[in-house]
Image (cartoon, grey):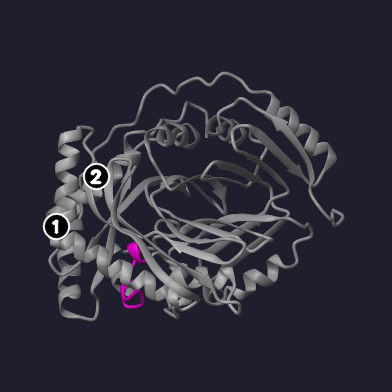
Amino acid sequence: MSRPGRYLEARLTTHEEPLLLMARLARSGLFHPYVVYENGTEWSLAGGALTSVQLDGAAARNLGQVEEALAQVPVCDWRAYGWAAFELGAALAGVDIGDKDPLLHLIVPSDEIRTDGGSVLVRSTSVRRLEQLKRLVRAAGTATPPAGRITFPLEDTGNYRAAVAAAVLEVGGGTLEKVILSRRVPIPVPVDLIATFVAGRRANTPARSFLLDLGGIQAAGFSPETVAEVTADGQVTSRPLAGTRARTGTATEDARLRADLLSDPKEVHEHAISVRLALQDLAAVCDDAVVSDYMTVLERGTVQHLASTVSGRLRPDRSPWQAFTALFPAVTATGIPKAPAYPLIRSLEGEPRGLYAGAVLTCDAHGALDAALVLRSVFQQDGRCWLQAGAGLVRNSHPEREHEETCEKLRSVAHHLVPAAPGRP
C-alpha cells in the first residue's frame, strides 16, 4: 500500500444511538481487528491495522519505543487504540515475571468511525473502502433485544478467602500497606460479547466503556475509573476509586450503605492511602499536582465507591507516555507500594492477569492519551470465557467481606451476559 498522507473523510448525519451503531458495526464482520471505545459523548470504532505496535518481555520496560513507532505512522491526525496488560506494570518496574505473552498492543486503524450521536465521521485510507463504510453507516436497522441471560453462581468455590487471609498477613507484617487480590469466575456457556456489551452498557454507569477483538483476546467492559487522562495541552488526571459498598436499587438501603461506606475506618484508610500514592505517582511527571473532589461517592453499576480526582500539569520535558508509565497500573488494582505487590499477587492468584486490571487506551498525534482501567469486564480467549473481580486488602480486612465485595462487583457484568446463538462465534 502506498503511504497516504492523510485519511479520506466523510461526515454523515445520523439518528442512530451511538451504542447501537457501534454494536452494529462490530457485528458486521468488516473490521478485524477492532476496538470500540466510549469517552464522554464520543464513541469510536477503530478497524484494521495501518500500523501495529506490540511489546513483550524485557522490551516492554521502555515505552519510549511506542513513541518512536507512532512517530512513523504514515498518516497525519492519527489516533491509536489498544490495550496494556496488567503485567506491563511489573515489566516497567523491572520485575521479572517470566511471561512471554504480549504486554501491549496498539493499532493505528486503516478505518475509523467516530460519532457523538448527532453526526458520524467516517475515515479510511481507501476510496473504495470509504464508500463501503458510508453505506454501512447509513444502513441502520431496527435492533432486536437479545433473548435470555446466562445465570450461574458467583460465590467462590476455590481458595479466595484463604488467599485473602494469607495476603492480610503479608500486608500486616511487611512493607505492603495494601494489595488488591482478584479471582476468576469461568462462564459455563459461550457468550455473545456484542449483545452483552449493549445489555451491560444499558445497565451500567461507567467512566469509559469498550468492546474489542485485538491480539487474540476479545473483551467487553464498563470501566469504573480512568488510570490516566492526558489532554493535548498537558493536563494530566487520574481518578482513583477505592472503598466499596453495594447498590441494591432501594434508595433507603443505598443511602444507609453510602453512609456506612463514608464512616468505615477500613474503607476510608484504603482510599486515603490509594490517593496518596496516586498523587506521588503524578508528582513524578507533573508540576502542581493536587487532589480535588476528595472522597466523594460515585455509583458504578451494582456498587458505589469512594472517589477522588488527582491532577497536575505535565512538565515540558515529559511526554504523555511517561505520564502513563508513572500512573500504570492503577494503584487501585495493584498495591502500595506497587513493586512488592506484583510477586504476591502472582503467587496467590496463580496465573497472569493479562488484560484484567490493565488498560484499554487511546492516544493521538496531538499528544492526548486516555487510559481506562479494565475492571467490570468479560473476557474471552483461547476457547475460555470468564469474569474477574478483586478487592483491596489492608491490615484490618476480613476474608468474608472481601469475598462479598467481589460478588457485588461481578454482578455489574454477570447479570447482563447474553448467550451466543447456535452457530454464532
Q: Which residue is mark 2?
A: 408
Q: Position of residue 337 (x, y in %)?
A: 32, 76
Relative to 270, say whether 42 is above or below: above
Q: Which residue is mark 1?
A: 264
Question: How many numbered marks are there?
Answer: 2
Nearest the viewer among 314 and 387 is 314
Check contact, mark 2 vs mark 1: CB within 8 A. Answer: no
Q: Position of residue 253 (x, y in %)?
A: 15, 37
> Position of 131 compared to 154: left or right?
right
Q: Where are the magenta residues, as a range?
A: 331-342
Say which amino acid is labelled 1. Asp
> Position of 180 compared to 19: left or right?
left
State the separation of the CA atoms marked 2 and 1. Answer: 17 Å
SS of the residue at dot 2?
A: helix
Q: Earlier in the sequence, mark 2 or mark 1?
A: 1
Mark 2 Cα shell of 10 Å, populated few (<14), some (14-19), many (≥20): many
Q: Is residue 57 on the magenta stretch?
A: no
Q: Is residue 163 visible?
A: no
Say which amino acid is labelled 2. Glu
Between label 2 and label 1, give the one nearer the viewer. Answer: 1
Nearest the viewer among 101 and 323 is 323
Q: Is residue 341 visible?
A: yes
